[in-house]
Image (spheres, rainbow, N blue to C red):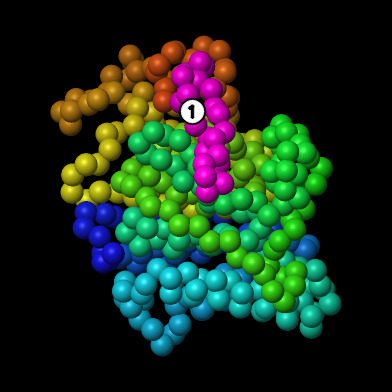
């Protein structure tokens, strides 16, 4: 594959929030955008306030330095083979791991610190995802509007779930849901999971820390991700929703949107998300009617249903007026042969 790919543009946005409960932010994020590629990193530190912050900061710094050595111009990444990129990402994460282990060894107050790391390197329509811990990468399909969790959490609860010992419902409120069996900083060696995804125009890639998924369900992530073409607005809406629901943890979100620069852009989505008002912190969804540039919206006649949340079953939703908000619609979790789970929305 030659880069840049014709007719493809990547737009992205990264945001992090301390949330509503914590006093400091142990998440660290990084978004590096270049004309032809994007490197996005989410790291969620653990081990106590200062230590958690330090672990995730070391991880991000080490990966940045390892992936783009100072003696190489970013442009050289255009022609590097995918297998070489994969090895470079894996090496950078393993160096980050060693750096954290070594820092903890000489700093008693940092003992036990660790961090997750989930990153995506995207060139054109090809994404390489590297993952350790429970920060997630999701692929939101712009065509069938399904959402696929690319990564599999390295948590005990996920292991119990995969083994069939607990149900998805039990997993949600499980007392051990924050306990990881794999993270950076725990041992001299760490296994890094790698995933490869082909993206299409209209798709969104969403990286997030568990501060988002604690409060916002995958189908809601899909909804919000597809409701606006601007990743800045999507990332803000996702963080606002997590915070409106309690913001119990630090919340980090990176959204990458694949756009066509020529033709074949997907049609405008029917729903747009309006920023929550300061007064009631609700999200407002409204129809986006097909509109010519000469037409202005009629404010009086415009249906603007207000919702306390994005609960699909909330009564009073005009049927068919909102994407995803059909109360008859159900979500079903599918697993493909690669072991990826897909949340499929069905009528
Ligand atoms: Ca967290």
Q: In this rendering, is residue 162 above or below 252?
A: above
Name the residue that disc number 1 marks: 345
- Is residue 287 found left or right of 214 in the rendered image? left
Task: Name the residue rendered at 48%, 39% in the picture.
Answer: 147
Return the x and y of residue 62 as percentages of the image width and height: 57, 76
Return the x and y of residue 230 as percentages of the image width and height: 37, 45
Question: Which residue is situated farthest in the right direction here?
Answer: 108
- Is residue 270 found left or right of 115 in the rendered image? left
Question: Which residue is situated farthest in the front direction here?
Answer: 337
Q: Quadrant of residue 188?
A: bottom right
Q: Is mark 1 within 8 Å of ligand 1?
A: no
Task: Name the residue rendered at 42%, 58% in the picture.
Answer: 127
- Is residue 125 found left or right of 115 in the rendered image? left
Return the x and y of residue 249 as percentages of the image width and height: 69, 49
Mark 1 residue element: strand
Work out which quarter of the rendered image holds the N terminus and state it.
bottom left
Frontmost residue, 281 versus 5: 5
Frontmost residue, 297 versus 51: 51
| Residue 221 in view, yes or no | no
Frontmost residue, 278 versus 302: 302
Q: In this rendering, is residue 201 above or below 297?
A: below
Few, some or many residues within 10 Å of mark 1 (<14, 14–19, 20+): some
Question: Is 181 covered by the magenta stretch?
Answer: no
Task: Name the residue rendered at 61%, 74% in the picture.
Answer: 94
| Residue 2 in view, yes or no | yes
Return the x and y of residue 61 as percentages of the image width and height: 56, 74
Task: Name the residue rendered at 49%, 31% in the picture.
Answer: 344
- Magenta stretch in the rendered image: 324-347
Q: Quadrant of residue 49?
A: bottom right
Q: In this rendering, is residue 272 above or below 205?
A: above
């Amino acid at each position: 594959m030659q880069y840049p790919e014709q007719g493809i543009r990547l737009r992205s946005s990264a945001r992090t929030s301390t949330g509503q409960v914590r006093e400091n932010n142990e998440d660290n994020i990084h978004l590096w955008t270049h004309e032809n590629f994007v490197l996005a990193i989410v790291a969620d530190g653990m081990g106590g306030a200062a230590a958690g912050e330090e672990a995730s900061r070391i991880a991000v710094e080490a990966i940045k330095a390892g992936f783009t050595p100072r003696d190489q111009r970013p442009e050289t990444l255009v022609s590097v083979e995918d297998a070489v990129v994969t090895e470079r990402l894996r090496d950078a994460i393993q160096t980050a791991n060693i750096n954290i282990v070594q820092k903890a060894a000489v700093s008693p107050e940092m003992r036990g610190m660790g961090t997750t790391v989930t990153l995506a390197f995207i060139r054109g329509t090809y994404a390489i995802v590297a993952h350790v811990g429970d920060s997630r990468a999701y692929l939101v399909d712009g065509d069938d509007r399904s959402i696929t969790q690319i990564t599999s959490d390295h948590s005990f609860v996920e292991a119990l779930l995969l083994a069939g010992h607990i149900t998805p419902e039990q997993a949600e409120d499980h007392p051990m849901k924050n306990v990881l069996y794999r993270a950076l900083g725990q041992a001299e060696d760490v296994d890094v999971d790698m995933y490869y995804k082909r993206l299409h125009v209209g798709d969104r890639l969403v990286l997030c820390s568990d501060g988002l998924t604690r409060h916002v369900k995958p189908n809601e992530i899909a909804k919000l991700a597809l409701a606006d073409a601007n990743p800045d607005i999507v990332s803000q809406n996702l963080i606002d929703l997590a915070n409106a629901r309690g913001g119990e943890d630090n919340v980090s979100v990176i959204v990458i949107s694949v756009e066509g620069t020529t033709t074949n852009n997907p049609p405008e989505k029917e729903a747009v998300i309006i920023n929550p008002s300061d007064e009631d912190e609700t999200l407002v969804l409204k129809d986006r009617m097909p509109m010519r540039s000469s037409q202005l919206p009629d404010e009086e006649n415009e249906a603007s249903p207000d919702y306390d949340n994005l609960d699909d079953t909330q009564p009073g939703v005009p049927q068919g007026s909102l994407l995803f908000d059909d109360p008859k619609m159900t979500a079903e979790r599918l697993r493909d042969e690669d072991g990826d789970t897909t949340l499929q929305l069905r009528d």
